[in-house]
Amino acid sequence: MVERLPSSWRCALAVPFFAQSTTFAELWPDIERRVDDVIRHGKYSHGAAVAELESALAAYTGARHVIGVNSGTDALVIALRAAGLRPGDEVVVPAFSFIASASSVVLAGGRPVFADIEPDGYGIDPSSAAAAVTPATRFVMPVHLFSQLADLSGVLAVAAEHGLTVIEDSAEAIGMRWDGTHAGLVGLAGVLSFFPTKTLGAIGDAGAVITDDPEVAGTAAALRHHGRFGRTLDNFPGISHATEVSGMNSKMDDIQAAVLLAKLARLEEDIKRRAVLAEAYSARLAEIPGVFLLPTVAPRPVPTSDVWYVYVIEVSRRDELVRYLADRDIGTETYYPVPMHVQPCFADLGYAPGAFPVAERACGRTLALPLYPDLDLDDVDEVCDAIATFYTGRPA
Ligand SMILES: Cc1ncc(COP(=O)(O)O)c(C=O)c1O
């Protein structure tokens, strides 16, 4: 199997946006052993591998509680519900993020209200978040986007002033720490996404709620499993299928947990590799006209450790560049082309274009370049040369 993986799984593109055939070839003995174990033991959902992963993630993040679920989106819905969101409660969300940051609020029964982002770093702008607060607002959701943490000190100050609960969308932020505390644990609860392209990616959908709060953890664990808290009912003695609230079926499957356990063992190494590649991009792209902005890390009042989940630049003629790179077999992604407040699914919230200028400008300019442990420095050179040639007619 090990020998067959690289050749049969290799992507046809010269530099694909994401690939992991080498990673899988290297980790295959451990993955094979773990998957074999799951198949032999016959509990494929919510089983021993999921429990082992939850413990390993608790050790890695420092979270008291990790609740494995079947996506980062479900983790957000469950975290909001477990934190006590009531129907109609407002949650302040940045206007520039992956759609699930806001759709999770609707799915949990709440109402997203949007705020603009900081000009450097893509985190929610605390002053815009404060301006969005109304008497119905009960939560604020900072999103740690791309490769750095949102301004948690600013968000915590807004939350304290307005009595809001902080739920962090830390779906992209595994490995990031705010003054030593893992992303997602600064507020009441956070989430992790293990979507395949994430820094720690599964081979399908998976996610987790992380929290230090035992009550939130207990409710989240019940909500992922149909709302069962494992209690008995007086009129059904001895039977523990009491369902107190309507929950979800969002259990994590054990094959995903088996793969994630194997990859978790190499996570720190992968994070270092990502940093080397990101540095190489920044060095090569520094002086190219048309590249407006390389990833920046906004100054924070506490030490932070940021992780290169993706490498996002801001460029002129973005969509033309995407097509130019695609013609040269270089994969890119546009994260995120449509500001959330003008997404059709939120039309009833009544926002107009122009409401959040920083978010809207980012939507028109941002471009994610390939960044993953399988990438090598020659690939980075190829991407940078293609970008330089697009803007100047010469390689970088
Ligand atoms: C910022 C953000 N929030 C939420 C999610 C949702 O995670 P998932 O795709 O696992 O549902 C993602 C990942 O795609 C994300 O990047």
Image (cartoon, helix red, strand yellow):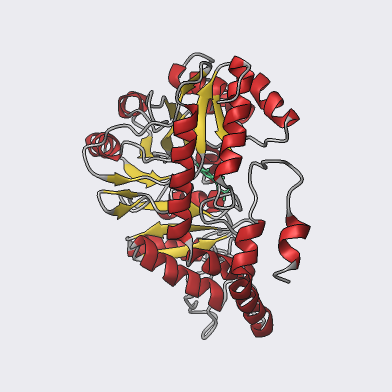
The answer to whether 383 appears left or right of 351 in the picture is right
Front in this rendered view, residue 376 or 162: 376
User: Ligand 1 quadrant?
Assistant: top right
Residue extending furthest toward the top = 354
Point 28% across, 38% down: residue: 159
What percent of the width, then of the height, locates residue 331? Answer: 67, 37
The spot of residue 189 in percent (x, y) is 37, 53
170 shown above or below 350: below
Residue 312 locus on image (x, y percent): 51, 33
Q: How many marks?
A: 0
- Residue 145 visible in the displayed image: no
Q: Residue at x 22, y 42 (%)?
A: 302
Q: Which one is in front, 20 or 279?
A: 279
Q: Residue at x 68, y 84 (%)?
A: 40
Q: Residue at x 32, y 32 (%)?
A: 298
Quarter of the image with the N terminus in it: bottom right
Residue 343: name its quadrant.
Answer: top right
Task: Classify 220 as above or below 284.
Answer: below
